[in-house]
Image (spheres, helix red, strand yellow):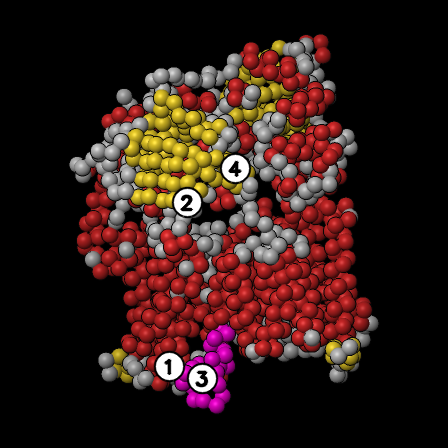
Amino acid sequence: MQVVANGIITGLTIVVLALGFTAAYLPTRVFHLALGGIYAAAPFCAWTCLRLGWSPWFALGLAVLAGAGLSLACEAANHALLDRKRAPSGAHLIASLGAYIVIAQATAMIWGNEPKVLRTGVDAVTTIGGLVLTRAQLMAAAVSIGVLAIFYVWLRFSGLGLRFRALAENSVEFALRGYNVRRLRLLAFGISGVLCSTSSLLVANDVGFDAHGGLHATILAVVAVIIGGRRSFYGPLVGGLLLGLVRSGAVWFFSARWQEAVTFLLLALFLFFRPSGLLGRKGRMEADV
Amino acid sequence: MAPNMIALTGRSANSTKPGAGYPWQLRAAGIRKAFGGQTVLDGISLELQRGEVVLLRGANGSGKTTLLNVLTGNLVPDAGEIHLLTNGSSEYFRFPAKWWRTLNPFDHFSPERVCREGLGRSWQDIRLFPTLTLQDNIAVATPAQAMENPIWALLRPSRSTKREKQNLTAARKVLAELGLAGREMSSGDKVSLGQSKRVAIARAVQAGARVLFLDEPLAGLDANGVSEIMGLLRKLAQDEKMTLVIVEHVMNIRRIVDLATTVWTLKDGKLEVKNVGKKATVHRASNGHDLQSWAAELTGMRADVKNQRLPGGAILSTIAPSQDRQGEIVLKVEDLVVHRGRRLVIGIHGEDGQHRGLSFALRRGDLAILQAPNGWGKTTLLEALAGLIRPTYGRIELSGREIQGQTPWECAQAGLSLLQARDHVFPSLTVREAFRLTHVTSIPEGLTHLLNKRMSSLSGGEKQSVATACATNSGAFSVALLDEPLSALDMASLRSFGSSLRNHLKDAAVLIAVPGSLGELG
Amino acid sequence: MSYLLHLLTYLGIYVIMAMSLNIIIGYCGLLTLAHAGYFAVGSYAYALATLKLGWGFLPATGLGVGVAVLLSLAVSLPAWRFKGDSFVLLSLSVQALFFSLFYNWFDASEEPGTWTNLTNGPFGLANIPRPAILGIELDTPGSMAALSLASAVACGILSWRLLSSPWGRLLKAMRDDELAARGLGKNTRLARVQAFAIACGMVAVAGAIYASYVSYIDPNTASLDASILMLSMVIVGGAGNFRGPLVGALILLAIPEALRFAQIPQAAASSLRLMAYGLLLILMMHFRPQGLAGDYRIE
C-alpha cells in the first residue's frame, strides 16, 4: 500500500509537469525541452525570496510567475520567431534544447551547483490508516490535484478552454476562423510555465533541488506523455500516474538504481507496441504514403 | 516528334522477353482495403497483359491512388491476393499474410520488393530527390549496384569507380534524350514541373520497371508539357512495349484515351474493365450551358455566365445577378504570383523572363466557380488569398482594403472566409462546441441532431456540412472561398447547401473551387 | 608545447565524434542522443581489454568497435519505423539504458572487471594503460597526439570514400524521400543499418583513444551531456557534407580554450562554456539552420 501511495504522489507531480509539456506541445507542436531549465530555476527563485524573509506564499507565487515569465520568453524570443520562418519541428527541438542549456547554466552560475532544500528541519509525518506520509507529500498531492482540477475544468467548460482545445486540434482552421493564433500560443506557453514551476516547487519542497535535475524531470514527463498518449490533454494524467506507480514499484522490487532502466524500458516498449499511447487512436494510415 | 525520346537503359538490354509465354504480368484478385472502417477497395480483381496501356479513372476519393499504392507495395491490402510474373519469376502474395511469412523480414510485401519484380511508379507530387543532382537522380535508380554496399566501396575502389563512371554516363545519356543536356548538375528542385515529371518517369524506367504505374502524369502541365509527356509515354508504350497504368483526372482523359487499350473505372470500391476498342466513353469537359443550369438549380438564380480563361487550363465562371442589382467590387486580385518553395504555382513565366500574374475581381452577389485541373494550384491560390501563404507579389484587395501579407486571422476578421478542402474540422470537439467556437447562431436544420456528437465520429458528408456551416454561418463576411465544398455531400445536404448559398449571395461574393469539370459531380 | 599537444589529441577525438555523428544526422536525417553511449562502449571495451586481458591497442580498440557495431542495432532497427521526435525519444531511452548499465553493473564486494562488477559502477575504471602498438609504447604527449590525429585522418578518409560512393548517394536519396527510394527497389533499411554500424563503430574508436589518453573513465562518459556536446558539433558545423563536422569540432574545441584565456574563474567557466553551446544551438536554428559549413537542414 505504501508503495502505491508513494507512487501516486510521485505520479501526480509528474502529471503536473507532463501536462505543462502537453499544454505547449499540443497547441504549438513545440517540443518544449526548455521546461527543464524552468524546472531548475523556479525553486531557486522561491529559495531566494524565503532567504529575504518574505512570506512563503508570496515567495512561491513569485517563483511560479517567474516560471511563466521564462516560458513566455522562450516563445517570444525563440519559437515565435522560428515559427514565422516556418522552421521544421527538429529546429524547434534543438533551439529548445539550447534554451534549456542556457537557462540551466545561468541558474547554476547564479546560485551554484550545490543541492538545496526549501524547508528546514525534519518534515512532520502523518499516519493515515497504516500509510506513513510526510507533510510535503500530502501537500504535493493536494496541490497537484487542485491544479489539475482547475486546469481540466477550465479546459472543458470555459470559452478560452474551448479555443485552447481547438488550437490544439487544428491550428490552421482555427486561424481561418479569425482567431489570433499568436496570442493564444503565448497563453499556451504561460500555462506550460506555471504548471512546470508548480511541479518543480512541490518536488523541491519534498526532496530538495539543484540546478541540473531539470532535464531529467522533463524527460520523465515526456515519457509519461508518450505512454499516456500525446494527442490528448488527458494522456499525461494516465501516463504520469502509471509512470509514478511503475517507478515506485521498481524501487520496491529491485532497487533505486534500476529506476531509470525500468522507465526507459517502459518507454521503448510503448514506442514499439503502442506508439500512440494508452489513450491514442489509430489514425488513417494513408497519411504515411 | 520532339527530341524527348528515351532509350531504355534498364533491363531491356538483355534479350530475353520477361514474362513471355504467359498472357499476363500481374494478376490481383479480391483486393480489399479499408481505412478506419471506411471501405475504399471492395474486392477488386484485375489482370495486366504485357504491353497493355490502361487508363484508370474514377471520381475524387474513389480510391485510385489507394489502388495504385496497393499494387506497388506501398500499402498492404486487408485481404486478397497478388500474383506477379513480370520478370519471368513468379511471386505470389496472399493477404492477410500467413504468420510464418511475417517472421521473415526480407519476405514482406514492400515497395522495394515489388520494384525488383519490375513494377515501377511515378508519384502525383513527383518526389525527385531534391538534394541530388538530376544526373544522380537517374543514376541512383540503377538496380543492383555492387558499390552501394559500403564494404565493396571500400575494398574495391578501382572497380567501383569504373562501374560508377559507366552508370553516370548512362544517366547523362538518358537526360540528354530527355532534352536536359547541360542540366545534369542542377538539383532536382530547380527544374520545371514538366521536366521533373519526365525525369521521374525516366528514373522509374532506369530502376528496371517493365510495368509502370503513373499517378496523374499530366496534372498541372501546360499544353507544351502535356505533349512532351505524351510523347514519352507513347514511346514507352509503342516502341518499348511497356505496360502502363495511368491514373488521370477527367480533364486530361481525352488526351490519353487514344493511347489507352483498356479503361478501368473505379466506383464504390469496385473496378469496371472495358476494352477501348469496343466502346470508348470519354467525358468532355463541361460547357457554359451545363454550368448555368447547374448553378440555377443549386441557387435558384437565373443569370448570365461569364467565363474567364486563366492560364494553365483553368476557367473562372462568374454568375452575376442581373444587371440592375450588381454590387460593388469586394475582392480584387491584381497580378498575383505565388511560389511554393522554388516552384512557380500561380502566374506564368512571360517571354521576357518576368512572371505574369493572375488577375480577377468579384462583386457582391457574384457566384464564381473556379474549375481547375488537379495540380493547377487552386488550393495554393485560395491559401494565398486567405493569408496562409505569402504571395511572391501582387495585390489582393478585400472591400477596398489591401490584405496581402496579412495573417490568416486578420484576413478572416476583415471579412474573408476560407473553407479548406480537407482537414477542416476539429476532430475531438463536439459539433455544439464547434458552432460555439465559430459563433454559428443559426444552426442548419439538418445538423441539429448531431450537436452532441464528436466530429471524429461523423461521416464524411456530415463533417463537410458542419465545416461549411462553421465557415459560412458565422457573422458577416464579404467573400467566401470554398474549396471543393460539394464532395461527399448527398442530395439533401446539397439542396440545403444551395439554399444557404442563395442566402449568402445577398450580401457577399462566393467563390467555389472544383476540380476539373462539373460533369462528374452529378 | 604539451598544452598544444593536449589540444591536438582532443581535436582528433572530437573530429572522429563529429564525423561519425554526421553519418547519422546528415546522411540518415535522424537526430540521435545515444551516440555518447557508443563512445563509452568503446572506452569501456578498451579499458577492460587492456586492464583484464592485457591486450594491445589495436585488438582492444577492435573489440570496442565490434561491440559498438553489434549494439548499433539497438538504434538502427527501431529506425525502420521511427522518425522525427519519436526517434529522438527512442535514442534517448537507449542512451539512458547504456548509462544505467555502466552505472549499475557494479558489486562492491568484487574486483572491477569481473562478471558481477564489470564496470565498477560510479567509481569507474582507473589506471588504464597507455596504448602500445606493435610493442611500441606511446607514452609521450606527442605520440598520443600523433595517434589521435592519425586515427582522425584514417576515419576521415574512410568517411570521405564511403560518403562520396554510390552508397553515400543512396543514403542521401533515402534521407530526402525514403518512400521514393524504396519505390526504386532500394533496401533502405539495410543501408540505414550499415550507416549506423559504421557511425557507431567509428565513435568507439574515439572512445578507445579517449580512455587510453585520460586513463580513467566513469559512467559520465555515456551521459546525456556528452551526447549533447557531439550533437552541438554537428549542428554548429553543419551536417550532410564532409567539411561541416570538421568546422564544428574545431569550434567546440576552441570555445573552452578561449574562455580559459579570458581568465574566467574555473567554476563559472564550465557554466559559461555550456551556455555558449546552448546559445550557439539557438542562434544556428534561427540564422543558419544548415550549420556554418553544412548542406543539410534538420527536418
Q: Amino acid at mark 1?
A: Leu
Residue C109 on the magenta segment: yes
Q: Is residue B47 left or right of residue C116?
A: left
Q: CA distance from mark 4 to mark 2?
A: 16 Å
In percent of the image, x 62 and y 10: which residue is there?
A: B304
Q: Nearer the viewer, mark 1 or mark 4?
A: 4
Residues at badges 2 and 1 in contact (C-beta under 8 Å)? no
Q: Nearer the viewer, mark 1 or mark 3?
A: 3
Q: Are marks 4 and 2 on the same chain?
A: yes
Residues at badges 4 and 3 in contact (C-beta under 8 Å)? no
Label 2 packing within 10 angstroms: few (<14), some (14-19), many (20+):
some
Give residue A160's position: percent from left, percent from top: 75, 47
Q: CA distance from mark 1 to mark 4?
A: 60 Å
N-terminal label among 4 and 2? 4
Residues at badges 3 and 2 in contact (C-beta under 8 Å)? no
From which residue to which does the magenta span run? C99-122
N-terminal label among 1 and 3? 1
